[in-house]
Amino acid sequence: MVNESISCERKMENGTYFYFMLFENLGSIKYAFFTLGFIFYCAVICFNVIIILVIFLEKTLHQPMYILISCLSINSVYGTAGFFPRLLTDLLYDTHKISFEACIIQTFVIYSYASFELTILMLMAFDRFVAISKPLHYNNIITTRLLAFLIVIAWLYPTTFNGIGCLLTSRLTICGNKMLRVYCHNYEIVKLSCVNNTVNNIYGLIVLITTIFIPLSFIIYTYVRIIIICQRSTREFRSKAYQTCIPHIIILLNFSVAVFCELTLSRFVNGELPIALNVVISLEFIVVPPIVNPIVYGLNFPDIRKKIRHLIKASK
């Protein structure tokens, strides 16, 4: 009994901190990774802040579609803030440990970022569907009050589900403390627990369905309907509709592939994939969309592109 008690105390002590094992033995190359990461993070912040400022400052862009684009940029800043500062710190220092509480917070930020991205893309799909299917009634349907309500729901909906999931994880007794990741991952934390985690696994599946598959299914259904409507319309109408929808579809495909890779990776046994491939796949959904989104929207929407040029000239 005494030995079991001592063993339990050691397990709980070991579980106080997690260690990111992928940072081990990087040598001097970690400084090159730090430099690249810092430059990339600065670019993400710069590009997305420009999109936010342009849409916020220009009254002509105070329209539902552009407001939702700014929401994507805000979410990108939010998500990368939960990842890059910690990553850059781990690259600089030799001790790659994170407290259990900080790990739960990082998990919540990254997971809620991913969920926000899909709910915002879902609102974008709905906005385009109304604009294309009922153009004469668009302003009467997508009012400022309705848009504000939908945005609040789009943020609260995943926040609640992911918050409960992280709360359930925080109640687990942790035995192990080594992660083959470069950031905290809820599934990895659950696997390190030494108690029955059936509730966490079931709830994780519920979160996956409600925050990933349901929004994604709605988005796919909406764009299929849009394509059907466009095929029955004139060539001019079809060209304008595709011009506004294609950037959204590019963003959707980019993020969907990244999330699919992350979900697939999380089901692999640690060590089954090469380390380099493990890192690339696990980082794609948190690294690629925040840099791709502002570039796609900045280049494909003439109104945003013109205002960005005006803002840059004004700053000079």
Image (tube, rainbow, N blue to C red):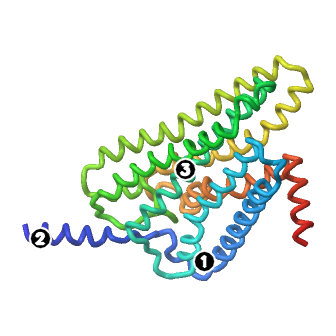
Which amino acid type corresponds to the residue marked 3 in the rendered image? Glu
Of the pair 173 and 75, the residue shown nearer to us: 75
Of the pair 84 and 181, the residue shown nearer to us: 84
Q: Position of residue 275 (x, y in %)?
A: 54, 62
Of the pair 266 and 73, the residue shown nearer to us: 73
Q: Quadrant of residue 29?
A: bottom right
Q: Is residue 200 left or right of residue 268?
A: left
Which residue position is annotated with label 3?
262
Which residue is most to the left? 1
Q: Position of residue 209 (x, y in %)?
A: 48, 37
Q: Residue at x 53, y 75 (%)?
A: 90
Q: Is residue 40 left or right of residue 270?
A: right
Q: Report the Cα–Cα distance between label 3 and label 2.
A: 40 Å
**Secondary structure beneath disc 3?**
helix
**Secondary structure beneath disc 1?**
helix
Which mark sits nearer the N-terminus, 1 or 2? 2
Q: Quadrant of residue 199?
A: top left
Residue 30: which numbered mark, if any? 1
Which residue position is annotated with label 2?
3
Q: Position of residue 254 (x, y in %)?
A: 68, 46
Q: Residues within 10 Å of mark 3 (few under 14, many from 20)?
A: some
Indicate whether 230 appears above or below 283: above
